[in-house]
Image: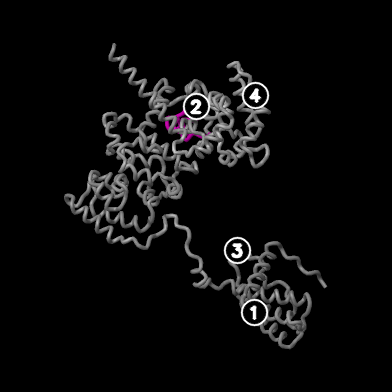
Amino acid sequence: MPSPQVLQPVLKMKVDELFLNWLSDTTTQSLLKDYLDIIKSGQHVDLSDRDAQDKMSLTFNENNNVASQRNLAEKKPLPLGTPSSPPSASTLPSGSSCNTRVSGSSARVLRRSVSTKKAQVRTQEPVTTALSESIPKFYFPQGRPQANVNVDSLISKIEKIFSQFPNERATIEDMGKVAKACECPLYWKMPLFCLAGGDRTGFVSVHKFVAMWRKTLQTCHDDASKFVHLLAKPGCKYLEQDDLIPFLQDVVNSHAGLAFLKEAPDFHSRYITTVIQRIFYNVNRSWTGKITCSELRKSNFLQNLALLEQEQDVNQLTEFFSYEHFYVIYCKFWELDTDHDLYIDQKDLEQHNDQAISNKMIERLFSGTVTRDRKVHKEGRLSYADFVWFLISEEDKKTDTSIEYWFRCMDLDGDGVLSMYELEYFYEDQCQRLETMAIEPLPFEDCLCQMLDLVKPEVEGKITLRDLKRCKLSHIFFDTFFNIEKYLDHEQKDPFSSIRELETDGQEVTDWEKYAAEEYDILVAEEAANDQCNDAC
């Protein structure tokens, strides 16, 4: 007797799948339950019994008929060049149908083979409505639809507002009223105006606007999805940096707290660039350069945007729109940009904060690991937009974005782990700086022990991004390896003072906000002193 054919791995997986389908069938489960009850009661199950033979023969014949029909269908000639399908489970040996007595392992083989054929037919049955309805929809990329939204009522309010305008056409000056009728924040007016075609014609008709807004309400069900839909390019479901320019230009033109900028149009683009970089710094957590609806929902940007309508002083909105913060960033960049071409090179950046940043770290900053402008990177320069990211990350190393920023710089091989070699590579530069200052540096082995105790990595000898975000003292870690001034400040402090600050500090004011406030006061005082000197002369 020839040895049984060994199943191929893929075919065996299919047979196992069909067996599980048979085993999950309600008829099979009921039959097995009956046999189990009989066994529990102490009775003997005789598969040679006439009733059992009849059931088995009937089941086998039913499935055999189905298999015969399938075989006839499969015998149709294939088109020329069409590869033949692999052998189906129905062609596997399943025992002879003429045997009336089956017992032991042969019975198991027969039952499995017969049920396999039956399961092949059952897998083609459609999923019942009841089963599909038992799992409610849980993914809403455009926001969860709200049942209580009366679209017709909202449209009626909008039409009523448009009726107040000449020829039922709204200009950009009228869009504030239209935005409120749409139940949107005031400064959504420019995105609403542009999507309805107002940027091309200079006005928006009631019919075009109603059609646009009705479609928006039907497809977008929360503020994040609506905002992205209004500003994104056609067909895009994300925001890029240039998508925000018209919207922010309208903020500059119409917000009372920025009225003084009307006399300095040259600074409009630089303020807008600063705000855009701060938006992406805080919102675009994926570092893709594309803000999605999901990222927008997780941020507080839309809440800050709504506050612009209520807050007359933009400097109170420190996270995105503060003019004072822009003033500090731009002045710091202007000091380094000696030729004032709005780009700086490595030598320029070395002068930042009295050469506090190590040369090796500056080289990493210009390597392209954290910069966005690829063209400028190839030229060995840093743009103003990239400088915004650098300065905020340098002055506040406690935020997630800044930790990611410096981790990318220190991870030389890009493997997601800071090895001891990488730490020593940056620490060597610090030692040389300390020696030039006549300060004896701490041996690397001792420094490493301190840092490992500080971070407490999950895997010994390997520091990951997760470790640094968890330790809450990442600013001390980073300053130790590439900022000489702040490293010395930390060394002179009580080693437990940082821990006490974390326990008592409610983080109402971030390190960046403290720095910006102090620097702004210094810059204003210097400007006032210069004005007095000029008046005296």
Q: Classify residue 368 as left or right of residue 197.
A: right
Mark 2 highlights which residue? 380
**Label placed on residue 246:** none
Question: Of 415 and 485, which appears nearest the observer?
Answer: 485
Q: Residue at image x 44%, y 38%?
A: 508
| Sequence-first disc among 2 and 4 | 2
Q: Amino acid at mark 2?
A: Gly
Residue 138 within the segment the image draws in magenta = no
Q: Quadrant of the C terminus?
A: top left
Question: Of 52 and 140, which appears nearest the observer?
Answer: 140
| Sequence-first disc among 4 and 3 | 3
Mark 4 highlights which residue? 442
Mark 1 highlights which residue? 30
Tell me, yes or no, if residue 482 can be seen here. Answer: no
Find the magenta span and give its range: 369-388
C-alpha span from label 2 to label 1 = 75 Å
Q: Classify residue 353 as left or right of residue 455.
A: left
Mark 3 highlights which residue? 82
Name above or below for residue 384 compared with residue 212.
above
Residue placed farthest to the right in the image?
1
Badges 2 and 1: C-beta atoms under 8 Å apart? no
Observer-side mark, 4 or 3, equals: 4
- Looking at the rendered structure, the secondary structure element under dot 3 is loop
| Sequence-first disc among 1 and 4 | 1
Q: Quadrant of the N terminus?
A: bottom right
